[in-house]
Amino acid sequence: LGLAASLTTFLLFALITTKPSLGQSDHVFDTKGNPLRWGRNYYILPIIRGSIGGGLTLGSHNKSGCPLYVTQEHSDLEKGLSVAFSHKTSKLPFVSTRDPLSITTTGPVATCKLSLTWKVIQESTTLWLVSTNGRSDLPNSEFRIVFYQSYYLIAFCPPLPEVPMPVVCPELGIYYAKDGTRYLAFGNGIEPLKFVFEKADLTNSQNLHYIETVV
């Protein structure tokens, strides 16, 4: 099945649940109460620490090498790799829940020479994973940040009519693979992961991450 057809099948199930609104106009704030800025570096961390795991990083998928996939650190002590948000048309300096955006991993990482911009890849008829090697001008790399109560969600929200789909945009959570890898994903049975954003200081706090890949 194609991406559009499979998304429609999955989202028929999503329609029976209550979702936070994507129409909010507020700025997105980091853990210190400052609005997120386009192009700045931030860690995406789960709002609840402990067994739920740490921040987001990159890893190989089924030892297949490139492209890398977005995964979650197992330990809540690990912040993972930072990301930056970009938007093609926004004239304001701050990230807003109104804005469609692309997400690019920016923390230093030794890997194959592919883009680290996120995109959605279909793994099966009921599972979609977030990988790298995306392009900000393509619909499979378009996301939105959703504010709900005191935390944020990240939704895959491609523009219409490129990827026909209902109004509801699927929110990203963690898929636990049999080998123990935690993939950022959406699909049947995956609960949205509640995030906060922490500003990253890459010059002082982050060492080079080496990820085993097969090129």
Image (cartoon, helix red, strand yellow):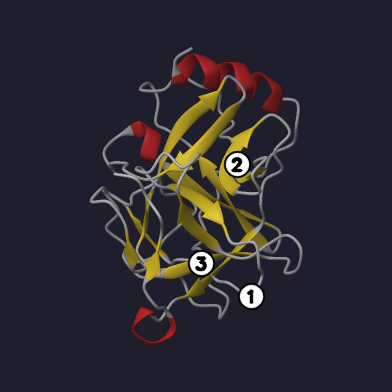
The type of residue carrying mark 2 is Glu
The secondary element bearing badge 1 is classed as loop
Residue that label 2 marks: 171
Residue that label 3 marks: 80
| Residue 175 place in picture, x, y as percent | 64, 42
For image coordinates 45% across by 55% down, the residue present is 58
- Is 93 placed left or right of 193 in the picture? left
Q: Are marks 1 and 2 in contact (CB under 8 Å)?
A: no
The type of residue carrying mark 3 is Gly
For image coordinates 51% across by 67% down, the residue present is 80
| Residue 92 place in picture, x, y as percent | 31, 62
| Residue 68 shows in the view | yes
For image coordinates 55% across by 50% down, the residue present is 24
The secondary element bearing badge 2 is classed as loop
Q: Mark 1 or mark 2, which has the lower sequence index?
A: 1
| Residue 40 place in picture, x, y as percent | 35, 70
| Residue 85 place in picture, x, y as percent | 37, 58
Give neighbour class at mark 1: few <14, some 14-19, many 20+ (Cα, 10 Å): few
Label 1 vs label 2, nearer the camera: 1
Q: Could you say which disc has been placed on residue 77 in the image?
A: 1
The type of residue carrying mark 1 is Leu
